[in-house]
């Protein structure tokens, strides 16, 4: 059914764009969009807000794109953006930001883990003057102990890098147009959305929520994917690992100098200890550190290489809908 919301006053109303990254969410996307429609309709009754919803299909291998295509045909509230292949969630969020026309945008996941009912509270805080409204996780659903520990370590590293507390940080955020324009102006290809939002500053308020379990479909973030995500974003956003390598190297050099001094004193005093156990242990430790340092440097070089190539972050394709093209 075509959405019946009055749009004649669009130019005089505040406009909010909802960005929904979608990857293999065929089991839930229709129900989620129905919930979004209900939520936005209720908000519009009480608050003069005009909504648009951008569904960004990140190269799904199921029929998510076909479902999105049908929804955009049936309801003008929805617009579909379709990637030529899977480019990742960061690219999907960027595509939504670049195509958004709202005075503010809200990024929300399609798997029901981000409560849609918080959208009203986010908009209220934005209208009160906040440029960024962060939805902060109080409790993580369906997360193993190992994933929780790794997420905590990652958030701690990013907190140190950005100078802002990122414990419980999520991609569920509202951004004012000023923040959107600042992020769009950044030229880097390797992007970390949460970090960039923290880095640009502006007035921030928070809403605490409990992550909900997935209603259907498969978990998208197994441990290996989380580890890869953490490494890529740490290297893309901060030089902290390089500084740590330099610090560890300095400490090893000091320790080596102290050991050398001790050895010389014992040698000239006639108490030198025979054998090479200590020497071998030091060589193994130093050699291992050198290999780790080379690996870290190589990660940064690979990011520089990708930046220099200048390839687009994502590529969209057009979908034919009733003799009209949809991007």
Image (tube, rainbow, N blue to C red):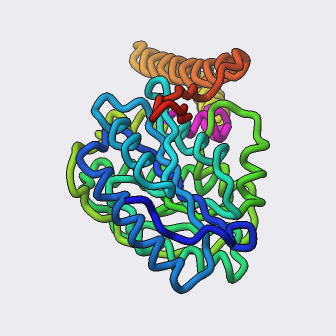
Measuring from the top left, give residue 292's x and y in whole percent.
51, 23
Res. 227 image quadrant: top left
**What count of labels does the image hold?**
0
Q: Residue at x 43, y 59 (%)?
A: 2
Residue plotted at (61% across, 64% down)? 16
Position in image of residue 225 (x %, y %): 36, 35
Q: Front-most of 96 and 186?
A: 96
Q: Decide whether residue 63 is among the magenta residues.
A: no
Q: Is residue 171 visible?
A: no
Farthest residue in the bottom direction? 46
Q: Is residue 124 above or below residue 6?
A: below
Q: Is residue 25 left or right of residue 277?
A: left
- Provide residue 50's location: percent of width, then percent of height: 60, 68
- Pick the front one: 196 or 29: 29
Q: Quadrant of the N terminus?
A: bottom left
In front of the other: 72 or 190:
72
Q: Tell me the quarter of the image containing the C terminus.
A: top right
Q: Residue at x 27, y 54 (%)?
A: 143
Q: In the visual, does 112 lie left or right of 261?
A: left
| Figure quadrant of residue 253 | top right
* Vertical comparison of 84 with 10: above or below: above
| Highlighted range, magenta | 231-245
Looking at this rendering, what residue extends furthest in the front direction?
323
Q: Is 111 placed above or below 94 here?
A: below
Is residue 235 inside the magenta stretch? yes
In the displayed structure image, the side of residue 253 where residue 52 appears, left or right = left
Q: What type of secondary structure mainly makes up the magenta span?
A: helix
> At which x and y percent is residue 101?
68, 54
Evaluate whether residue 44 shows in this view.
Answer: yes
In the displayed structure, 303 sits above or below 40; it is above
């Amino acid at each position: 059914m075509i959405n019946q919301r009055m749009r004649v006053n669009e130019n005089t109303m505040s406009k909010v764009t909802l960005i929904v990254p979608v990857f293999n969410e065929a089991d839930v996307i229709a129900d989620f969009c129905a919930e979004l429609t209900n939520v936005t309709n209720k908000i519009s009754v009480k608050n003069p807000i005009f909504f648009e919803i951008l569904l960004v299909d990140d190269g799904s291998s199921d029929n998510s794109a076909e479902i999105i295509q049908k929804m955009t045909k049936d309801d003008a509230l929805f617009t579909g953006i379709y990637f030529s292949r899977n480019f990742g969630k960061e690219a999907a969020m960027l595509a939504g930001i670049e195509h958004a026309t709202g005075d503010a945008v809200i990024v929300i996941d399609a798997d029901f883990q981000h409560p849609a009912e918080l959208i009203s509270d986010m908009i209220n805080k934005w209208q009160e003057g906040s440029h960024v409204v962060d939805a902060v996780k109080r409790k993580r659903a369906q997360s193993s102990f190992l994933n929780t520990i790794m997420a905590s370590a990652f958030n701690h590293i990013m907190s140190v890098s950005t100078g802002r507390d990122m414990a419980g940080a999520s991609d569920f955020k509202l951004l004012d147009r000023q923040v959107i324009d600042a992020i769009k102006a950044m030229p880097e290809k390797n992007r970390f959305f949460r970090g960039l939002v923290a880095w640009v500053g502006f007035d921030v308020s928070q809403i605490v929520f409990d992550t909900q379990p997935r209603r259907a479909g498969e978990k998208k973030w197994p441990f290996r994917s989380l580890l890869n995500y953490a490494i890529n974003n740490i290297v893309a956003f901060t030089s902290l690992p390089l500084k740590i390598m330099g610090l560890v190297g300095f400490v090893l050099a000091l320790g080596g100098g102290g050991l050398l001094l001790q050895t010389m004193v014992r040698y000239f005093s006639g108490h030198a200890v025979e054998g090479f156990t200590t020497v071998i242990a030091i060589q193994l430790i130093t050699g291992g550190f050198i290999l780790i340092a080379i690996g870290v440097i190589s990660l940064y070089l690979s990011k520089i290489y990708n930046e220099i190539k200048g390839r687009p972050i994502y590529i969209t394709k057009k979908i034919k809908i009733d003799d009209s093209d949809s991007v």
